[in-house]
Amino acid sequence: MSLARPAELAGTINAGRALRNRRARRGRLVIGVISVLALLAATLAGVTYNRNQTVTRQLHAQAAVLLGQDAQRRADSAQGTAALLALSAWRTDRTQPEAYGALFKLYARLRNTEAVRELPIDHALSFTAAPDGSAAVVVDQRGVVHRLTGLLGRVEDQVFTRTRALGEHTPQVELSPDGRRVALLDEREGLTVWRPDRPDSPDRLPVPAGWDAAENLRDLAFSPVGSRLAALFAGPPDGKSERGRLGLWTIDGGRLVSRRTLGPGSFYRVAFGAQPDSVLLYHEGDNGGYLRVDLRTGGDTGSLPIEYPADLGLRGQAVADCTPGGLRIRSTRDGAPLHTVATTDCASQLLDATRRYAVVEPGQALGSSDLSTVKLVDLRSGLVSWTTAPAHEALDGADFAVCPRGDGSLSASPSRAGNCCVSPPPGPRGSSAIPFRTRPRNSFSAMTGASACWETKRRRPCGSSTPPAASQPNPRTVCSSAS
């Protein structure tokens, strides 16, 4: 018995150890299985979460893109709705270009235009400006030509004192694309090219005999680089139609390099086109438009039909016209459409003085008959901007220049003096006093539109008239009219 007990005790101990080991292995197996399951569950949860986040980001991005695109489409027609859509797009996903692009577009709409800057010329007969707004040329009511610079800052006025209209003809004026040369025809100097550094020594251009520049000159045009000048003249009738004449001069040397008699038809404007060695001639009628003429051969190379109103812009690179579907901008090279802007109305003077911006949907007057709200369409990009601009109707050419600034804003510069645009509200009798630099007061009736003038030395009436008469026949008399 004593010998068997140790053996039994050892077996019992071994059995207990085996049972403990089995339980330990079972426990480790269970823990391992649970750990694997937990790891799989965590992995699956992570994958699901990431997938949900990816889908959410994609949905937000797509929503921001759609909202931003809708906001940009509505920016020109409904700015309030466009602002809400742009803000929703920004809050949905601010990383999308469409989201911050819509906000930037609306921001540009809100601050893109500076208050109208008045230029020191009163009662201008014509007004034209360089494409970049660096300079402008104005012809005042005496026929004197002014070259203005610094339109975005302190305006400097350079007067060509030798230019003056001696008869009833307004001087024909054209400014070179860089704003450094002025081509004009007046009744005192003839056809000349003026340079700012030599204001008293113009370069005279020879005009062929019989062309009668003083009576028959219709239009002038500089080439895109400003090295050549084209002039369009009316010609004598040829049977039942008129045959115009086209001359081409080189600026350096003042040499006539080409003179041609055009085909039958009445042409009124000339401009260098997008194609080299070609010009565009404007003619009216049922099939009115622009005719391309090759300067080397004199033959026409095609036509560009238009609807009215229409004008050439971007140095002859584009033509803009107002159609029932809106403002249409096309290339003058082949007539291919560049931009189309939906609009309900176009200004009769379609382009500004720089020939870069089209004026559409002129609005109501802003407290003054000389200011109105309009939309400006950039011919290069087709973008639309809101601005205020003068609404004078007595100018032969465009009456204001739109000058782009470096920060993307715009400045509209009219050619009339500031005291002609601001007047107090009408009184009880419907009369309004217009402030002038001279002491005597000039008043007009807001009800009848009649005007009165006062002599500057004696305060007594010197006569009355009805609009649109606006003149200064006597240096001692100031007259004005209500329009």
Image: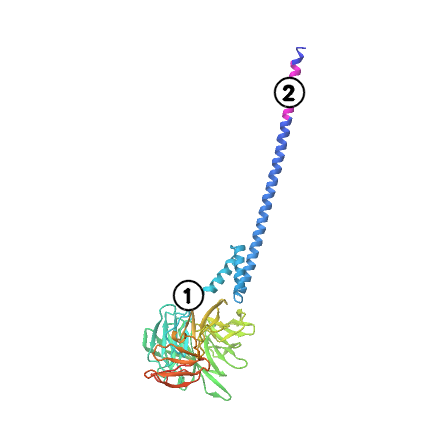
User: 328 and 461: which one is in front?
Assistant: 461
Give the dominant element type of the magenta stretch: helix, strand or loop.
Answer: helix
**Do residues under tags 1 and 2 come within 8 Å of each other at their CB atoms?**
no
Give the residues drawn in magenta, as a range: 6-21
What is the secondary structure assignment of the residue under circle 2? helix
When the figure is inspected, residue 59 is found, relative to residue 446, above or below; the finding is: above
- At a point 61% along the width and 40% down the height, the residue shown is 40
User: 203 and 17: which one is in front?
Assistant: 17
Residue 95: x %, y % from top left = 51, 54
Instruction: Kindly identify which residue carries mark 1.
Output: 405
Quarter holding the N terminus?
top right
| Quadrant of residue 470 within the rendered picture | bottom left
| Quadrant of residue 63 within the rendered picture | bottom right
Residue at the extreme bottom: 239
When the figure is inspected, residue 107 is found, relative to residue 397, above or below; the finding is: above
* Colour pattern: rainbow
Q: Who comes first in sequence, dot 1 or dot 2? A: 2
Magenta stretch encompasses residue 9: yes
Label 2 CA crowd tier, 10 Å (few <14, some 14–19, many 20+): few
Q: Amino acid at mark 1?
A: Arg
Name the mark on residue 233.
Answer: none
Quarter holding the C terminus?
bottom left
| Residue 211 in sight in this render | no
Magenta stretch encompasses residue 188: no
Question: Image check: 117 left or right of 77?
Answer: left
Question: Image check: 358 left or right of 153?
Answer: right
Q: Amino acid at mark 2?
A: Asn
Residue 264: x %, y % from top left = 50, 84
Residue 305: x %, y % from top left = 53, 76
Name the mark on residue 14.
Answer: 2
